[in-house]
Image (cartoon, rainbow, N blue to C red):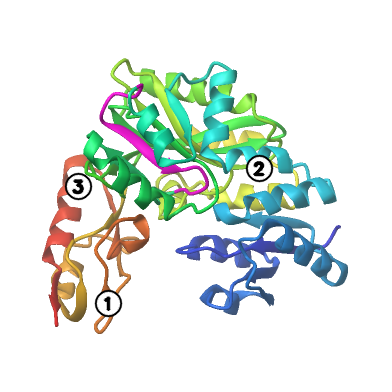
Amino acid sequence: MGNNTILLLKAGFHREFALKTLFRKGFEVIIIDSPFSRELAYADYPYITSDISNPQKLFELAVSIYKTRNYSGVFTTTDSCIITLGMLSDYFELNYFSEKTARMLVNKLEVRKYLKAIGADNTAFFEINSLSDLEKRSVALSYPFILKPTDRSAGKGVVVIRSEEELKEAYDYVRGFSKSSPLIAEEFIDGEEYCIEAIVCNGVCYTLDISKKKVTNSRYCIELTDITPAPLSNEWKEAIEAYIKDTVSELEISNGILHIEFKLNGSGQPRIIEINPRPAGGNLIEAIYDLKGLNVYDYAFDLAMKREIHVNKLKGQISQPIEKFALFNSFISPTGSGIISNIRGIDKAAGKFENDHEKLILFYGKGDYLPAPETNGEARGSIYLLDSDFDNIVKRSEEIENSLEYQFE
C-alpha cells in the first residue's frame, strides 16, 4: 500500500459531502456497491455486487480488487459494511479496529453486555429468541419497554411495548427486521436523546460536538430532528464528553470515526443506545463544518489512508466558539399513504430560507407511492437550516414542513 487510492465500501445515502471531500483531496476512488447505487457514477473504479451486505463475500471482493488497484485505505459510511472493514483492517494491518470489535459493535446485544461488563451502563436488558422469551422477560421489565433487532440501526425495527396485549404483534413486527439474529428487550430510558460525533486517533478519542435529537414518542421510534450544538450547559457537556472518552478508551479502536447515540436519564447520567464506528447520517457532519469550519471527513479519510493527523489543529477546530445552531429534520408528514398526485407549497417553503447553506430535499415525487412511516427510511424529505436563535430555527423548520401539501390520487 502506498498510493492515493481509497476503497469505499458502499457509498451510502445522502453522502454528497463525503464524496466532495474525497474529490477535493484528490483521491482516486474505488466504490463497491449494489447495482442500484447512483453513487457508483462518481467512482473512478466502480464495482457492482449483489453481496454488499455479506461480510465474507465483500471481503473477498475487496481483497481481489487490491491485487489490481492497490488501494491505500478503506472507508465505509454504512453499518452493513462495518464487519468487512474490521476484516480488512486485520488482513492489511490498517490499524482501524479488529473484526472481533466490529462484530461486537454491530450487535446491540453484545454492546449491552460489553457496557455492563466494563461498568459503563446498567440498563436492564434480555436476549429474546422467541415469543415465549418475550412473554417471560416482560414480567421483569416494567411497561413501557423497548424491543428491537440486535443487528439494525437508525431506529429500524424499534418498537415501544406499552402493555401485555401488544407483545405478540410487537414480536412479529420486530422479527420481520431480523430473521435469524436474536432480538433484545430493554428498559425504556425516560429522558432526552442525544448523539455525539468523535474521532479516534492512535487510540485517543476526540469528541467533536453533541447534538440533540427528536424521536417520535409513539409506538415506532423514528428519528426526526438533530440540532447542533445541543443546548446543554458547559458543565453537562464536559461530564458527557468525559464519560464517552472513558467508555471509548475501553474499546479496541485505534483509528476511525464514531457516531454514538445516548439518552440522559432523570439523574443526568448518559445511557448509551448504540456505538457506531462510522459517520453520522443526515447532515450532522456537514453541520459541524458549517458551525466550526471542521471537516470531519478530512480527518477520517486521512486516518483511513494512514496519514499523519495534526492533532493540535484538530483540537483548535474543536474548541472554536459556535454562534449558530444547525438543524437537520427528516420529516414524516404527511403520515398517510397513497399515490402522490401533486405536491404544493415548495415555492413557499423556499421563501423561508435565509442563506445558501439551507436546503429542502424531497425523497418522493409526483407519481410515487408514499408508504405509512414506520422507519427513518420512509421519511418524506429533509430540511437543513442554520440560525443564531434556537427557538427560531425550530419554528422555521416547522413552518417549512407545514407549507408542503401532498395530494393523493
| Residue found at x 68% / y 56% | 55
Q: Nearer the viewer, residue 154 or 347?
A: 154
Q: Is residue 248 left or right of residue 47?
A: left
Residue picked out by circle 2: 102
Q: Who's the residue at 22% across and 39% down the image?
A: 165
Q: Badge 3 local density, few (<14 within 10 Å), some, or many (20+)?
A: some
- Residue designated by label 1: 369
The secondary structure that most of the magenta stretch takes on is loop
Location of residue 63 in the rendering, given as x and y in whole percent from the top left corner: 81, 62
Of mark 2 and mark 3, the one earlier in the sequence is 2
| Residue bearing the label numbered 3 | 394
Q: Nearer the viewer, mark 2 or mark 3?
A: 2
Task: Tell me, yes or no, whether the two marked residues, 3 and 1, touch with CB atoms within 8 Å.
Answer: no
Sequence order check, earlier mark of 2 and 1:
2
Q: CA distance from mark 2 to mark 1?
A: 36 Å
What number of labels is visible? 3
Quarter of the figure with the N terminus: bottom right
- In the image, the segment drawn in magenta is 140-153
Q: Are marks 2 and 1 in contact (CB under 8 Å)?
A: no
Determine whether the residue tagged by mark 1 lies in a helix, strand or loop: strand
Q: Quadrant of residue 237?
A: top left
Could you say which quadrant of the image residue 346 lies in? bottom left
Q: Where residue 375 sits in the image (x, y, percent)?
A: 34, 55
Q: Is residue 148 magenta?
A: yes
The three-letter code of the residue at mark 2 reads Ala
C-alpha span from label 3 to label 1:
29 Å
Q: CA distance from mark 2 to mark 3?
A: 36 Å
Q: Which mark is residue 123?
A: none
